[in-house]
Image: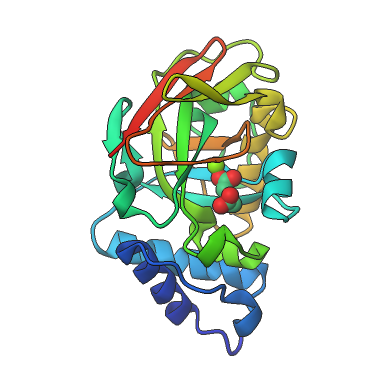
Amino acid sequence: MIGIDTAGIAEQLGTAADTATAIPQLAAETGLDVDGAYAVQTALVQRRLDRGERLVGLKMGLTSKAKMVQMGVDEVIWGRLTDVMRVPDGGTVDVGDFIHPRVEPEVAFLLDRLPEPGEALGSFADAVRAVAPAIELIDSRYANFTFSLPDVIADNTSAAAFVVGPWSPVPDGLDNLGVLLEIDGRVAQVGSTAAILGDPRRALDEGIRLAGRHGVRLREGWVFLAGAATAAVPLRPGAHVRAVVERLGTASVRAA
Ligand code: 0L1
Ligand code: MG
């Protein structure tokens, strides 16, 4: 895209994340569109890879009506996950490392071998080795957690940290499992995996298709976060967060 300072925008977003300092939205002022925003995301994630982080997965964003309404946008989006973003199940995150973190309950897939470009996608059970309950910690780098679609794509879809609970074999159905988000033992959000594009398995098709448009192939062994089953909840210091997914179990994290 002519005239867009992709590297400069990526640097601003990366510095905002590194210093936990919110910045104003960038897209309207710079004329960034969706394709340009994915180019910024690539540069932003490359900045992490250049300092030694490894790509370990892909996440889908805005996969539920609740999220689209909460954020005022209307398209499924995707972002990249690195090893440094992964927090062990039952581990601790420091709220001070983030600007205004929120948590949301998700379903994670452990990817098996996916088709080569041009090969047909086999069954979901062939593509996915295991499934797990998960928590995504999102942290928009924009002031007031407010952004346009290109803004949030450029910001790696607010990806900040994630927790994956115990892996289970792929169950027969994933499309209507109950989901709870608990904070300090109290139910904060209730939902169903049906909120994730009607069936979280669809999120994988979308991820392969949309990331493929930008030349990104999902890899064997990667974690795939299919999307949130409820709206996201602000993460306060001291909170103990649990995501419970029917038949899959629990993932948890503490906030320091
Ligand atoms: O994972 C998500 O659904 C987040 C996508 C970006 C929008 C947001 O920050 O809530
Ligand atoms: Mg999410």
Q: Position of 18 compared to 130: left or right?
A: left
Coloring applied to the structure? rainbow
Give the camera-side residue of 82 and 222: 82
Which residue occupies 63% across, 23% down? Answer: 190
Determine the residue positioned at 66% across, 62% down.
Answer: 149
Residue 126 is situated, as x and y percent measured from the top left of the image, at 56, 23
Tell me which residue sits at (72%, 55%) in the image: 72
The C terminus - image quarter: top left
Q: Name above or below for residue 129 compared with residue 229.
A: above
Give left or right: position of 182 versus 74. Answer: left
Residue 148 lies in what quarter of the image? bottom right
Rendering coords of residue 63 (x, y %) = 67, 41
Quadrant the N terminus occupies: bottom right
Say how many tags the image has. 0
Of residue 226 and residue 26, the one placed in the foreground of this image is 26
Residue 181 on image: x %, y % = 53, 26
- Horizontally, residue 255 falls left or right of residue 241, namely left
Residue 12 appears in the picture as rendered: yes
Residue extending farthest bottom: 3
Image-quadrant location for residue 207? top right
Q: Is residue 131 visible?
A: no
| Above or below: residue 189 compared with residue 118 | above
On the image, which quarter does residue 48 sit in? bottom left
Q: Residue at 65% of width from left, 29% of height from top?
A: 200
Image location (x, y in percent) of residue 128: 52, 25
